[in-house]
Image (cartoon, rainbow, N blue to C red):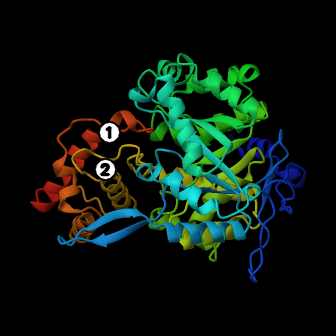
Amino acid sequence: MDRRDFFKMAGVAGLAMAGLAACDGGGHAGRPQGEGGSSLGQMTFRTHPRTKEKVSLLGFGMMRLPFRKETGASGNDNDDGIDQEMVNKLVDEAIRHGVNYFDTSPAYCKGLSERATGIALSRYPRDRYFIATKLSNFSPSLWGREASLAMYRNSLKELRVDYVDYLLLHGVGMGSDAMQEFRSRYIDNGVLDYLLEERKAGRIRNLGFSYHGDIRVFDYLLSQQEVYHWDFVQIQLNYLDWEYAKEINPRNTDAEYLYAELEKRHIPAVIMEPLLGGRLSNVPDNVVAKLKEREPERSVASWAFRFAGTFPGVLTVLSGMTRMEHLQDNLRTYSPLKPLTEEEFAFLRDVATMMMQFKTIPCNDCKYCMPCPYGIDIPAILLHYNKCVNEGNIPVSSQAKDYRKARRAYLVGYDRSVPKLRQASHCIGCNQCSPHCPQLIDIPGELRRIDAYVERLKQEALQ
């Protein structure tokens, strides 16, 4: 897509008419609370075309909540449950600055996210926030009607609500036979029919799905819009996946296509992975230099959030915010949004082309592969590898320039990022992880490759 087509799609000439300008958030759950002398402007809101509700353009993804840490006798850090006090503080800061969309799932944070979200939000009047959760019945043991409906009912209990604002069929398009898996999870067992009745009864205000993987399932569900009347669809969209998703992973679909299909049907898009699992905030040094040259005061991540937010058909952009500085940076980006100009869009396309020169593993740190039955920290291993690729610390030869520096950076960083008992050398290839990966990574294969590379580094056996 060229720049002219992008701006025709994004409707930049009519941003105010499209609802991009910040508004006062009137109506259900909309008004930002700006007391306390905040220097931020007002949050940018989007209007849902059917309900007319005002939704904050920044959505709080409750996937990467902070955990408490305690140091055991071995000296290793062990997870000790969600840090509820910090979650409450993050939610308080978000709501104070206008964020009103909170996205969770029974699968997030080792099954603890919904409970933590419910505790934090239940301290506010119910009309101050929107809750989005998912029917995350990935395992075949949960495909039966009763097991799936028990998960849905438990979500209401954990979230301390008697209705859900946004409910998603989670991970549509995953699996080796994605269409049959979709039917087994939602059609053959009558679960989708039940959820449609729940929407009629008002216990589900908006029904949609999150898409990963097989485009045939995405296209089929949109072709059935007159039957299901999807209220929203969650897709992966960022400036790298806009045109290069299939090059990153052949099973993926470029976000340009996904967004266009939703826009022509007037279905609001909820955006996940605007940072591509953090890869667009931890970009190579030469890319950082280019971004900072243009906007010295803005963060690297803000470029990706501005890209996702520029499209008027986007209802909200989700960000998994573990620390207060993540939240505050995102608030600066969206309070209010400064949409991309035509020239900035062209610039980000050039940045995306530059980044495709770096062959990283398409891990988004979603942790669907976890827990590993053998204790391996799969995401940490893959993310450390990606980090070293981006920073130029993957020496391919002992004769390479800065070999010693790169070797030390990889090995020392590996031990710091991943405890030895959780490193790739302990993988036995059971492959319980790969079927759950939305990016369809051959996880055991990548772990074997990384472990072999680490051993060559340790033995100084690179040729």
Looking at the picture, tell me which residue is in the foreground, 190 or 292: 190
Picture coordinates of residue 315, whole percent (x, y): 73, 48
Is disc 2 placed on a helix, strand or loop?
helix
Where is the C terminus found, in terms of image quarters? bottom left
Is disc 1 placed on a helix, strand or loop?
loop
- 252 on left or right of 16: left
Cβ atoms under marks 2 and 1 closer than 8 Å: yes
Looking at the picture, tell me which residue is in the foreground, 329 or 2: 329
User: In the rendered image, which quarter is residue 290 located in?
Assistant: bottom right
The residue shown at (39%, 36%) is 436
Picture coordinates of residue 428, whole percent (x, y): 17, 41
Of the image marks 2 and 1, the number of the one nearer the N terminus: 2
Looking at the picture, tell me which residue is in the foreground, 406 or 167: 167
Mark 1 crowd level (few <14, some 14–19, many ≥20, 10 Å Cα): many
- 407 on left or right of 192: left
Label of residue 433 in the image: 1
Position of residue 59 relative to residue 413, above or below, is above
User: In the rendered image, which quarter is residue 456 located in?
Assistant: bottom left
Distance of mark 2 from mark 1, alpha carbons? Answer: 9 Å
Where is the N terminus found, in terms of image quarters? top right
Picture coordinates of residue 116, whole percent (x, y): 52, 58
Looking at the picture, tell me which residue is in the foreground, 139 or 380: 139
Position of residue 18 relative to residue 79, above or below, is above
Residue furthest top in the image: 188
Mark 2 crowd level (few <14, some 14–19, many ≥20, 10 Å Cα): many
Q: Which residue is mark 2?
A: 378
Kind of residue at badge 2: Ile
